[in-house]
Amino acid sequence: MQLAAITTTTFHRPDGYVYLTAERNRTEGWIYARWSGIQTLSTVTEGGLAYLDMLRDEPCAKLLNDHSELVGPFSEANDWIAQVWTPRTIEAGLRYFAQVLAPGIFGQLSLQDLHMRIGDLLEMRLFDNIDEAKNWLRSVG
């Protein structure tokens, strides 16, 4: 049985709002995580653990993490991302992390803090738009 080129999973808050769409793109060789709206420690951990499960089920060295629709800060989750999520994803095969920045300053500051914490652990690059991030991922690995 051949797997679909793209499989998508959506994550909802209790009110039904889709806060994360995770797409495995087998053609491009990456997982595309598109975050939307306000994030909490709970949504970041739920989405992060789901991504880790995806990575363990079918190893993939590239993550395209898109914050272009993110609202506000998520820095309360940075300790968990740095101490728990990052080591586990690296162990599961993540090598390249393309990050599309949020339009707002608070999301950007949260990401800059995270980049300082984990940027030396894997190859992580920050981008202003999705096309630049995709082009970089296509050029690595």
Image (cartoon, rainbow, N blue to C red):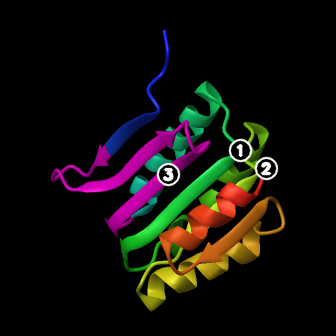
* SS under mark 2: loop
Q: Position of residue 26 (x, y in %)?
A: 55, 36
Magenta: main secondary structure: strand
Q: Earlier in the sequence, mark 1 or mark 3?
A: 3
Label 2 crowd (10 A; few <14 / some 14-19 / many >=20)? few
Q: Disc 3 marks which amino acid? A: Tyr
Quadrant in the rendering for residue 52: top right
Q: In the rendering, which numbered label is found on residue 128?
A: none
Residue segment shown in magenta: 11-39
Q: Earlier in the sequence, mark 1 or mark 2?
A: 1
**Marks 2 and 3, how far apart at CA:** 16 Å
Q: Is residue 83 visible?
A: no
Are circles 1 and 3 on residues that touch, CB within 8 Å?
no
Q: Is residue 5 visible?
A: yes
Residue lying furthest top in this view?
Answer: 1
Are circles 1 and 2 on residues that touch, CB within 8 Å?
yes
Q: Position of residue 1 (x, y in %)?
A: 48, 9
**Marks 1 and 2, how far apart at CA:** 8 Å
The residue that appears at 61% across and 28% down in the rendered structure is 58
* SS under mark 1: loop
Q: In the rendering, which numbered label is found on residue 61?
A: 1
The residue that appears at 33% across and 64% down in the rendered structure is 36
Mark 2 or mark 3, which is nearer to you?
2
Q: Position of residue 102 (x, y in %)?
A: 45, 78
Residue at which label 3 appears: 32
Q: Disc 2 marks which amino acid? A: Gly
* SS under mark 3: strand
Residue at which label 2 appears: 141
Image side of residue 100 versus residue 38, left or right? right
Q: Position of residue 50 (x, y in %)?
A: 49, 39
**Marks 1 and 3, how far apart at CA:** 12 Å
